Image (cartoon, rainbow, N blue to C red):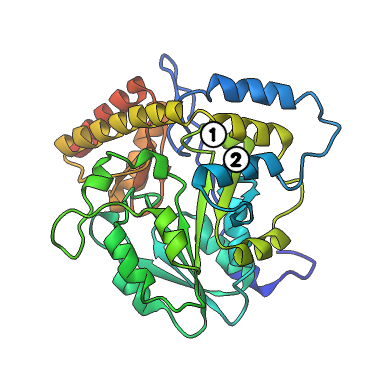
Amino acid sequence: MTNFRVRPALADTPAYVPGKPPAPVEGVQSYKLSSNEHHMDPLPAALEAILGAARTPHLYPDPSAHDLTAALAAHHEVPYDNVVVSAGASEGLSALIGITAEAGTSVVFPWPSFEMYPQVVSFTGAEKIAVPLADEGRMDLPAMLQAIREDTRLVLLCSPNNPTGAVMGQAEFDTFMEQVPADVLVVLDEAYVDFAPGSEGAASIRANGAGLDAPVDSAVGLATYPNLAVLRTFSKAHGLAGLRVGYTLAQPGIIHEMRKSIAPFSVTAPAQAAAQASLAHLDEIAVRSKEVGVLRDELAARLREVGIPVPPSGGNFVWLPLGKRSQEFADACMAAGLAVRNLGAGVRVTVGPQEALDRLVDIARTFIGK
């Protein structure tokens, strides 16, 4: 209870609950598998860039992140004005919701998905329209189309979807976008897209129930649909979560409005330098992402052998649909020195070192045997 006046929307705004750290357990190494952090260190070039940029903490960072923005525009082969850098993809997400949603409007998103979606939408006073996922944790795009109303300002998509890992196909995406009203902004959250190539999640895509489809090509989408914005981050595959740097790709009109919402100086100089250095070594990032993907798919297969129906994932995590037993499993993991993420309908486990994954499978085997 507060003794000052707050916005009514706060009564319906859920607080973001971060992943728990692992509890110390005598005799074993504890591991945090609850926040989808990269278990490998950043690239040496990124670490060197951080040290170099950290020598001038008395100066503000470049508010426009000009050099990083230019590098991103060149990498994606888009004009400079089609890119805006933010403090993680989360700040970009908040800006996109903030420039579109307000009381009397609605926002459509899949559920379960990224926990910040309902939080940020609620804060604006807009109505949350959460559309349940389909089989294997996939977004139900036909149902999401049906959920769009006259007052809908924004639709959120997530591929690979966090926490289920499902990857969206190009054909289903195109079918969806062709039917979304042109004045409704669609945001495609691709925080985990670097882990998707070659994954089980990408291989499992089905278009209209027949044949294999290719994953969404967001570059083609941006060139085709003026009402599309794509979110990316350096927190996941690049291993720079602690620096908070992400970006949005969209038409200049959308980027212009976003700049009004993104705080000036929100991306520090070390973050800008590290992201630019990491971007210059994408071949190494791809190798590391593939290594994580191999561990992910092996973990999923081992958990299925134990008896847990883990769906194919294209992220750096797997989804255990344990329902009412989710907290019991999370507690068993914590007791063994592993922190995992209980999200109610299931448990999300981040890919970590092999020792941690072996221990997780042992816990799952005992858990299912009860």
Identify residue type, mark 2: Ala
Residue drawn at point x = 51 percent, y = 53 percent: 231
- Residue 315, position in %: x, y? 37, 42
Disc 2 and disc 1 in contact, CB within 8 angstroms:
yes
**What residue is pinned by disc 2?**
71
User: Which of these two is toward me, 161 or 17?
Assistant: 161
Residue drawn at point x = 56 percent, y = 67 percent: 121
**What residue is pinned by disc 1?**
279
Identify residue type, mark 1: Leu
Can residue 121 be seen? yes
- Residue 193, position in %: x, y? 40, 45
Residue drawn at point x = 51 percent, y = 23 percent: 41
* 325 sits to left or right of 90: left
Q: What element does badge 2 sit on?
A: helix
Can residue 13 be seen? no
Q: What element does badge 1 sit on?
A: helix
> What is the distance, in whole Å, between disc 2 and disc 1 at their CAs?
8 Å
User: Which of these two is toward me, 224 or 127?
Assistant: 224
Mark closer to the observer (2, 1): 2
Q: Which residue lies furthest to the right in this view?
A: 58
